[in-house]
Each structure stands twice: as structure tokens, then as C-alpha cells.
Image (spheres, rainbow, N blue to C red):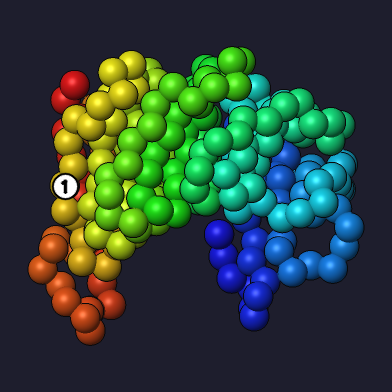
Amino acid sequence: MISLGKEVYAIHAFSPDSRYVAESIAGRHDFRKIHVVELATGKQVNAFGRSAPSSMAISPDGLTLATGYWDVIILWDMLTGKKLGAMSGAGQNLAGLSFSRDGKLIAAGTGAGGLQIWDVSLRSKVVSIDIGYGAGVSQPAFSPDGRLVAFGVYGTGTAWLIDVPRGKIIDHRKVSDLGCGSVAFSPDGRFLITPSTGGLIKWPYDKGGTIRVFTVTQ
């Protein structure tokens, strides 16, 4: 999410084939709050939804858009704007969404320090983890094989690793005194990369940035 000015925020999600981008700009004065644009031409192919979501993700097949509205995930046909279904009961503000590579699961980070994993076809929650710090979770990331989910926590500067089939925390590490806003797996799933200050730099901090790379073990 990026700020474009007072009370104006934008979120975007790219389709896996980079053909489309879905965008939502809170504060823009139009009726339809989600816009789908073809990147090659800049042409708007669709617009739908009556309120701006807090998070978005596009399925691996590029057909389904998931949007987070407080404690509800809405699924849309991205090219027609048809509502496909809803998954309700998150109980917290949904701050980030990610699909697994096979499109069967959605990981949802919450604004209160929780992670939830939902089965898309069953429309049901299969994993719920509350780390108990009451701090916002970054965009979750599935490992390439879908067995792990990693996420960062802004308020504590920690990175967390979750075993999806067991629904258990595998590990967590302090990586920054300035918040952990992103995580990513290497394409082979062997490594996890996070932003870092080394846990040493205090405010005011220097202008340089560092990263950490962890070996992933299951």
C-alpha cells in the first residue's frame, strides 16, 4: 500500500503473466472502487466493487481476484467483475493476501498480528495463528511447494515461518528494530530473504539498508 496524499491510498496486484494489474485507490471519487487495467495498452478492461479493499491478490491462473474487507475475503472473476464468493470470520483487519502457487489456499495477514490460511474451494479457514503482539503483519509469502508460509511483523521487526499442513510455528527471528515489512522465498524454496538492520541500529538510523538471507529447514 502506498500513500498518494492526505487520506488517499492505493493498492495494486499484478497477474502472474504480467498482462493485467488490479488497482484500488481509496479516496478516489468514483463509484467503482476496483479497476483492472491491461498493462500493454493501458486500457481499463473492467471496474467493479463499491468500496476500496485493504488488500488484494490475483490467483496463479490470473482469473480470480481476492480482496480483503476488514474481516471478509471477497473472491471476484477479475475480467467480468462477477462476485464468486466470500470467506468471512477473519475477526481482524486483513492487511495482506497471497495465493499458494496452486491457487488452492490463501494466506491472510491481519493488522493485529495474526496469520490465517483459507481453503479457497471450501471457503473455510484451515489455519489460524495469533502471535500475540498486536502488530501489523506484512504480505505473507508461500514457499514454492506450498508447505510453508513466511511473514514479517511491522511492530516487532520479526520474521516468522509457519508449517502449513500442521498449522504450527516453525521458527521466528528478530531481523530489524524498524519493523519487518516484507519477506520472500528463493525460487527453489531453500532460502528466505528479509530486510534487516541487524537488530543493532537505533533511531536515528543511517541511510543504508541491509538484508538477511536464512536457510530454510523443515
- Residue 124 in the image, given as x and y percentages of width and height: 54, 22
Q: Is residue 138 above or below residue 2?
A: above
Q: Residue at x 72, y 40 (%)?
A: 20
- Assign the N terminus to one quadrant of the image: bottom right
Q: Residue at x 76, y 26 (%)?
A: 84
Q: Is residue 11 above or below residue 14?
A: below
Residue furthest out toward the bottom: 204
- Residue 36 in the image, given as x and y percentages of width and height: 78, 44
> What residue did someone put label 1 on?
173
- Assign the C terminus to one quadrant of the image: top left
Q: Residues within 10 Å of mark 1 (few under 14, many from 20)?
A: few
Side of 176 relative to 21 (left or right): left
Q: Residue at x 37, y 44 (%)?
A: 114
Tag 1: amino acid: Arg
Quarter-wise, where is residue 134 in the image?
A: bottom left
- Residue 100 in the image, given as x and y percentages of width and height: 48, 25
Q: Residue at x 49, y 25 (%)?
A: 125
- Residue 16 in the image, given as x and y percentages of width and height: 60, 32
Is residue 192 in view from this perspective? yes
Is residue 195 in view from this perspective? no
66 or 196: nearer the eye? Answer: 66
Secondary structure under badge 1?
A: strand
